[in-house]
Amino acid sequence: AQTVTQSQPEMSVQEAETVTLSCTYDTSESDYYLFWYKQPPSRQMILVIRQEAYKQQNATENRFSVNFQKAAKSFSLKISDSQLGDAAMYFCAYRSAQDGNEKLTFGTGTRLTIIP
Amino acid sequence: DAGITQSPRHKVTETGTPVTLRCHQTENHRYMYWYRQDPGHGLRLIHYSYGVKDTDKGEVSDGYSVSRSKTEDFLLTLESATSSQTSVYFCAISESTGTGYSSNQPQHFGDGTRLSIL
């Protein structure tokens, strides 16, 4: 079974600075997908960024980028130019690439606080 | 936004009573999921469905049952609620490519149901 570990329960960053949230995972599969979801106080689960394991290039979405290290099974999220609206819980998630195995396995989350 | 509606949004009930949560989608997606979210645990999969009348267990399925009689509706039932089932419940949906590989499209989530069992 796959496991996802987020070792930082809480992080804080000064507004406009850069912060990196860590995520490691354990799997015996070679093809899979990785996701970062954001959960603000409104409780919605919002997709931030996704990465396909077969792609060597790190995914980027505006101020959000990942550092995907497949051999190390590491998938960190970097938020640049942090904004007050980035304050939320962030969850890392894993999904197999096998058809019919669409289940997500989540980490326990990192609560990010933005300091004005 | 993906068309996912969870009802009710909030519910308070007593131990031993039956509870049914409903997830309704307008996307005609094949897969539907029920997760529970608890502090320190993230989201954990309870049950999922890969088609009408086709369901399977997740990692925390004890005490829960599900039904899917129509593509658009996925029901989660607590036959006899216990205080340990106090949680926030999320429904999610996703599509399948049918190619032998799962889609890289993400799961889309409903807004959650906060369930308190006293």
Image: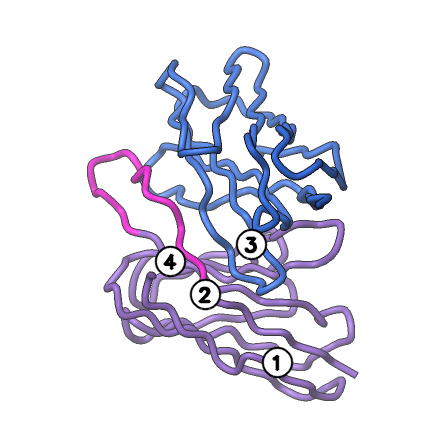
Which chain corresponds to the colour purple? Answer: B
Q: Chain of mark 3?
A: B
Which chain corresponds to the colour blue? Answer: A
**Residue wearing tag 2:** B110
Q: CA distance from mark 3 to mark 2?
A: 14 Å
Q: CA distance from mark 2 to mark 4?
A: 9 Å
Report the magenta residues as a range: B95-109
Q: In screen coordinates, is B22 left or right of A76? A: left
Q: Nearer the viewer, mark 4 or mark 3?
A: 4
The kind of secondary structure element at disc 2 is loop
**Three-letter code for the amino acid on which mark 3 is drawn:** Leu
**Three-letter code for the amino acid on which mark 2 is drawn:** Gly
Provide the major secondary structure of the magenta segment. loop
Q: CA distance from mark 2 to mark 1?
A: 23 Å
Along the polypeptide, which appears first: circle 4 or circle 1?
1
**Residue contact between numbered discs 1 and 3, judged by CB atoms under 8 Å:** no
The kind of secondary structure element at disc 1 is loop
Q: Could you classify mark 4 by the number of other residues whose Cα lies within 10 Å: few (under 14), some (14-19), or many (20 or more)?
A: many
Give the label on residue B45, or none.
3
**Residue wearing tag 4:** B93
